[in-house]
Amino acid sequence: MVVARDQAMVVQRRTMAMLLTRLVLATLFAVWVVWNFVPLEQLQSFTAPPAAEIRFSHSVEQHYKFSGHNDGGSLSEEMELGWKKKEIIDSLRSGSDTSSRVVSSGSPCSGRAIYIYKLPERFNRAILEQCGTFLPWFSMCDYFTNSGMGVPVQSSSSSVLAPAGKWFQTNQYALDVLFHQRLLHYPCLTDSPEEASLFYVPYYAGLDVLRYHYTNETLEQKNELGLEVMDLLKRQQWWWRRNGRDHLLVMGKITWDFRRNNETMWGNTLLKMAEFENMTKLLLERDPFEPNEIAVPHPTYFHPSSDSDISTWISRIASSSRDNLVSFAGMPRDPEHLRTHLINQCKDRPDRCKLLACSGNLCDSPEPTMELFLSSQFCMQPPGDSATRRSVFDSLIAGCIPVLFDADTAYFQYAWHLPEDSSSYSVFVSASDVKRRRVDVVDVVEHISPRQRLLMRRKIIEEIVPGLLYAQPGTRLLKYRDAFDTTIARLLQR
């Protein structure tokens, strides 16, 4: 009996220790959430609306949705996943500097070099030449001309887009081409693989998966080129030098397009294969649990060709009259969708909220949306088809403070391009609170003081905007560092 009693006490102590550990983790996480995501005004003012809280059950929702984990884990399991996501993004952010876009003096190469593999054209150019059939209802070729920037915008109002001649009809999936063309003009290239610190693989993986979205090809056909690339790489001695860890693949779509599950015909399965695990992958949206996936900004319509172009645009957005407190550009979906709730809230406050209904092809051109964002202090940015959304970057480069509803939209994504202190440039509101009618977004932003709005906008304009732009190929920026320069600098540090 004594032995049994002792064993019972041991079990009881272990159970209590486990519960205490979880309680401590929960408390630490709550403190971290408040510190990072709750605006200062909402902490200091009792008259402000309830602070919009981030729940890990929400922030991992996209991961569950796209990876097939729909069984709904416990709160402690969700928190453990959340801590893992934070550890990974902190690791990616370690050593990065998003506080300044001014390039330091000295050699941009710092004694390091990049080698570009010479792949057959079927891995890049031949894919691009199929732009007329990427979508069954119209040709996308105009969007990928001019080194991936698209056709120039014929601006009807010089007061909206400045400087003239630097705005293009850029497609959100043009990253494969844009990055390749910029890299071809980069001064750190080498023809000697033994001198290289980084190896770029010019396989247009994003366009390869895009061209099969609306066709009936088999999974084997959709994976074919990616597997061929891997076979070629494994024949190179440089691949084995670090088992692919110093090899770069630009995949200009979201990670979930390369993580197809058994229930859908959409996408391929390249990122579920062990062969691709060690490579560094650049994507528009990363899997928050994958340390070798790097999210980079969605391409916007503005492609400067000089420091002067960037300075001109910064002056334009800094002097813009922002008569709208908050705005939203988009179309409604089903009645319970977050967008529908936001549109209804906006319609209820027409004096404070401006709505742009993106019907037809209205928002395919930059002028309507940029004009809206330039005239707005805050811009609602709900998730798109996935957690991230190009419009987040369109609003940021217009100096409009984004209101986000999913932590995976930005906070667990762009470690190299956005500040760690999310409250310095954005407002977070829980999507579930909006859908349950517990929070009105217009009320939330209305309670943010004018001084805090000014500080946030200044942070965006002076420190963030240049690092979100993709300059034209061949551009040499001396004063600023764009998204490409920022990415390359961090890649060479890995």
Image (tube, helix red, strand yellow):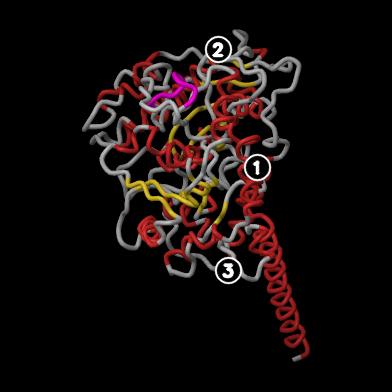
Q: Position of residue 261 (x, y in %)?
A: 38, 47
The span picked out in magenta is 162-169
Decide which of tag 1 and tag 3 comes sooner along the chain. Answer: 3
Q: Circle 3 sits on which residue?
A: 50
Q: As rendered, which of 241 and 257 lies closer to the eye?
A: 257
Q: Position of residue 494 (x, y in %)?
A: 68, 30
Q: CA distance from mark 2 to mark 1?
A: 28 Å
Decide which of tag 2 and tag 3 comes sooner along the chain. Answer: 3
Q: Circle 2 sits on which residue?
A: 185
Q: Amino acid at mark 2?
A: His
Which label sits on residue 419? 1
| SS label for mark 1 | loop
Q: Residue lying farthest bottom?
A: 1
Question: Tag 2: Cα neighbours inside 10 Å, few (<14), some, or many (≥20)?
Answer: few
Q: Position of residue 1 (x, y in %)?
A: 74, 91
Judged left or right of residue 39, residue 272 is left
| SS label for mark 3 | loop
| SS label for mark 2 | loop
Callouts 2 and 3 close, C-beta under 8 Å: no
User: Please, is residue 70 above or below residue 138 in the view?
Assistant: below
Q: Residue lying farthest top?
A: 191
Q: Residue at x 62, y 9 (%)?
A: 192
